[in-house]
Amino acid sequence: MKKSIPENLKVFSIIAAMVISSRIVIFLLAYCGLLFYRNQSPGFFPSLQNLWDRWDSNHYLYIAQHGYTSVPDKSPLIVFAPLFPSLIQLLHYIISNVFLCSLIVSNTFLIIAAITLYKLAAMDYDKNTALRCVKYLLIYPFSFFLNISFSESTFLAFFLLSVYAMRRKLWVIASLVAFLTVLARPNSGIFLLIILIVECFLEKPRSKDLLQKATVAVSVVVGYSCYLLLNKIVLGDWVAFLKFEKINWYHHYIFFISNIQSMFNQLRIKEPSYRITLLFPQIVTFFTVGLLSIIGLWRIRLSYSLYLISFLLATYSISWLISGERYLATAFPLFLILGIISRHAWLDFILTFISTILLAFYVLSFTYGSVTM
């Protein structure tokens, strides 16, 4: 027992160092782009908010500072789940700079997510494979969303903690974390039920086990109900978020094939920058993750595979989809599959090289105003 503790600390330190060093490189890359592309030198720290506070970041920071409101021009912000801005708000009582608070929250939960991903992978695979899974999470071409003022890392951390607690049969912890997972992102958090249900069928639990597992499902339902109650309290409508998603973000559900076809049609008419930074990566991501999902049916747990497939199809069934590749940054089975298939050094090198180059490209496209969201 005494030997395992230092070993765990060593592994966790390595993962934390991987996260911190990779995020520093991302921030420095964007800053160097500022120096050379715009020929400006405002200083590294003063430039952070100018470079990274864009798109949904503005909305989360507003909620953290002012809360939800029924004021007409701000009421649509109800579509943004409450957990991430609430965590920022808590830290804001200690640190005056709300943007800095958001970075601390995101990067802290990214470290938690990376460590939990490692622990989850290590339950089924060797340590080298588990470390590669973490590496592919960190070099995913859109993983920079995990370390800025977006909710991705918070949701991913709680989702992974939920799955890990379920795998360890820590049902009380799993129930509590599942509740928080749904509050981090309601429509994505409910996918925990897929993993829970499939694992129930595979393990054929006793009636006592079923009762314990049912508490996780209840927590998911309660978490979603709390989000609906927030809608009711603030705007007087239990499902106000659905109205704003449709009116303000043009989101409703359509058949995913129609969505993909629409993206291909837009490739012919949209300007080059829009095609390169939004349409093309979304299309490539869909087919790449789709292929990896099929491979995963034979490489990872069935519950993980079915979750990944379901999450992919649900994500690409959202009309006017502009963040598909970002949403998939939270699909942890994707990184398990990449960690497993990259056991050959040559394939690991190719995948690492391609992913790192794309990450650098999309970091610069995001920070310099391209439609990358």
Image (cartoon, rainbow, N blue to C red):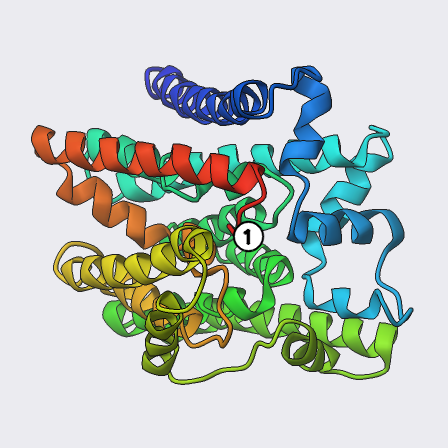
Q: Secondary structure at mark 1?
A: helix
Report if residue 113 is visible in the image: no
* Residue 120 point in image, percent of width and height: 34, 44
For the N terminus, the quadrant is: top left
Taking the image as shown, residue 133 lies to the left or right of residue 71, namely left
Camera-side residue of 226 and 41: 41
Report if residue 174 is visible in the image: yes
Residue 207 to residue 303: above or below: below
Residue at 68 percent of width and 25 percent of height: 47
Residue 107 to residue 195: above or below: above
Residue at 73 percent of width and 21 percent of height: 46
Query: Which quadrant would residue 193 be assigned to in this image?
Result: bottom left
Q: How many marks?
A: 1
* Residue 135 point in image, percent of width and height: 32, 32
Q: Amino acid at mark 1?
A: Phe
Residue 321 to residue 171: above or below: below
Residue placed under numbered mark 1 in the picture: 155
Taking the image as shown, residue 121 lies to the left or right of residue 367, namely left
Label 1 Cα crowd, 10 Å radius (few <14 / some 14-19 / many 20+): many
Residue at 51 percent of width and 70 percent of height: 190
Query: Which quadrant would residue 342 be assigned to in this image?
Result: top left
Query: Which quadrant would residue 238 be assigned to in this image?
Result: bottom right
Residue at 66 percent of width and 53 percent of height: 56
